[in-house]
Amino acid sequence: MLVFLAGSGIVSGQLTDYGPGYQTFMLRNPGAAGCGDDGRLKISYLNFYPGSGFDFHSAWFSYDSYFEPLHGGAGIYLAGDYYGGIMNDLRGGFSYAYFLQAGRDLFINAGLSASFIRRGFSFGNAILPDQINPVSGVSGPSSETLTDRAFSAMDVAAGFVFSTGIVSAGRSFSASACQRADCSIS
């Protein structure tokens, strides 16, 4: 019982949210930039629920590689998410990771990234609860007024990747700075 309690912890799977998942590893942890040695170009497009007409799309483009003069890896990415015509996210940035061989079989990558996030809104197609009539369906304009405002944020992150043999682990930290005090981006 003591071994179970001492060794337990919170572990999340590789694909914890929507999107290209494993292809966004450089975005999730900048220490992973250039880990594939040869340059890797990744392009992904996802159309969520295409037969239902929800109009949810996600597109992803990234390139990262190891560069000998930098003694590490570097990469860039651009991503766009379209949420049913109501919300649109555009993200882009770059990452750099320094590679350090700390032992015969122990490697440590330390990375930094900087990126931008632009979130826009268009509430013209939104249906709010007070617009729904239980008998006749959607009716009339809402008593609420929503503004189509957009905002931008800068994001900086740091990350580490430790690897030995076939085992690797990593940790990253991120901080955003918004143009407005009440913005939040997940």
Image: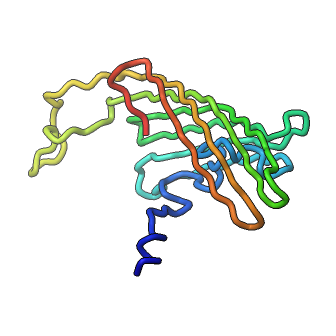
Q: Quadrant of residue 98?
A: top right
Vertical relation: 78 (above or below) 181:
below
Q: Position of residue 49 (x, y in %)?
A: 45, 57
Residue 21 position within the rendered picture, expressed as x and y whole percent measured from the top left: 58, 54
Q: Residue furthest front?
A: 2
| Residue lying furthest right | 69
Up the image or down, 155 lies above or below 37; here it is above
Q: Quadrant of the C terminus?
A: top left
Q: Nearer the viewer, residue 4 or 54?
A: 4
Residue found at x 35% / y 23%: 148
- Please state which of residues 43 and 7 is positioned toward the viewer in this rendering: 7
On the rendered structure, is 25 left or right of 99? left
Asked which quadrant contains residue 69, the reply is top right
Q: In x, y percent, where is residue 167?
A: 70, 65
Q: Quadrant of residue 151?
A: top left
Work out which quarter of the rendered image holds the N terminus and state it: bottom left
Residue sitting at x 63%, y 57%: 169
Residue 2 percent location from the top left of the image = 42, 77
Q: Nearer the viewer, residue 141 or 62?
A: 62
Q: Residue at x 81, y 55 (%)?
A: 103
60 sits to left or right of 34: left
Could you tell whether 43 is left or right of 121 in the image? Answer: right
How many dots with numbers?
0
